[in-house]
Amino acid sequence: MLVSKTEQGEWFSLASNHSHEMLRELRKSESFYCPECEERVLLKVGTIKIPHFAHEKGAVCSEKYERESEYHLKGKLALYKWLQEKGLSPQLEPYYKEIAQRPDIGFTNKGVSYAIEYQCSTIPEELFVKRTESYYHANITPIWITAGKNIKRKGHNLVALSRFDYLFVTKSSSGTWHLPAYCPVTDNLILIQHIMPVTVKHSLAQFSIMTLNSSPISNLLNPGSRRSSRLEDWIKEIRKAKNITIPLYGSVHNKFLKELYTHSFTPSLLPPEIGLPVPDLPFIETPAVEWQSYLFMDVLKQYKSISMDQILHSFKRRVRNREIKIRQLPQVRKGSALMAVKEYIDLLVKIKTLQPESQNSFKMVKPIIVHETIGNQNESEKIFYQSYREIISKSLSWV
């Protein structure tokens, strides 16, 4: 904690430039209390951590789920001072009594109230979602920022994101998926943009790394669309995803592989119509290659005339059977996994695989062919992307 109340009920912030000597003298004559639980807190002025307040041993304050590290304290203070320099009059550790929550920083911009949660350690997903929903209920927009040290970059345009990492992901007004991170050691604000999952763990993404002082406030509130990933990047990663091996999928008893083999399909020979990117793809944890294969086996391969109800029924059944998993994206207020499915069907219409018969029914006009040799598969894929390159790129606003 960096803010407390004095015995007289006055707010006291360690964000001001108090010397260590002054603080050591002050704690001899002054008592400090947590603004949330009103229990006494200790003013700690050491040589390792920056000065901070801490609850006494055995305190029952709701803040006990996280003990703030030096990394967290420095990052929170840097973000607070950055917002001050932007002229936004931020509050450090404000307590919102109506929802009993205390973010790291609160501020208002253009009439909108924001709460910054700088989260450097893992907390239960249920708690993350609960706190997020409480902010929205109070008409406060949460901004969750992860620690820069937690980012696992796997290449120029590839990042490994865990289920917990995805809780930080949000979407700008332009439809750009992004995740903010800050590192107080390097003083870099890291923006991971155009997040498009390829496997459960790996996602294509673009990285924007700027010093905090040179970063505009829009990088947090509503980042603009930068150059997004090229279609070639997606094709390359999807090829890897289709070259499935047992170690990659964990077990010879993998349900997805078993079902493919039951239908006499070889993963590496899956047609290019399976594994297509759509705007709301992050809502579905199961990789595109898998859930689109399920739709192919359940419906697209079986019938010449299909309905959207059939497609959605197949998808929901697979979700109930836990063969398809949905992601929690508590900060994303528009879109859904079902919307991603509808976007996929819409894309099949645009590439002339399906043709609308009515508002919710379609006719298969160009069959999805599974080739028997890798040579035929590669030639088919080459022709496919040459023919529909612009359409597939446009579906993601990729350039």
Image: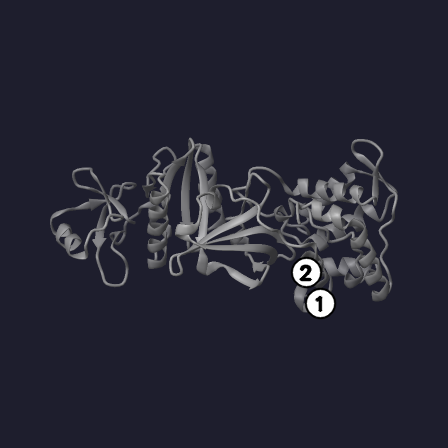
Report helix, strand or loop for mark 1. Answer: loop
Q: Which mark is residue 235?
A: none
* Residue 61 screen position, x and y as percent: 31, 46
Q: Using the image, determine if residue 245 lies above or below residue 202.
A: below
- Foreground: 389 or 133? 389
Mark 1 neighbour density, 10 Å: few (under 14) some (14–19) many (20 or more): some
* Residue hosting label 1: 245
* Residue hosting label 2: 237
**Circle 2: residue type:** Glu
* Residue 126 shows up from this direction: yes
* Residue 67 shows up from this direction: no
* Residue 112 screen position, x and y as percent: 43, 33
The answer to whether 208 appears left or right of 248 in the picture is left
* Residue 319 screen position, x and y as percent: 67, 46
**Circle 1: residue type:** Thr
Q: CA distance from mark 1 to mark 2?
A: 15 Å
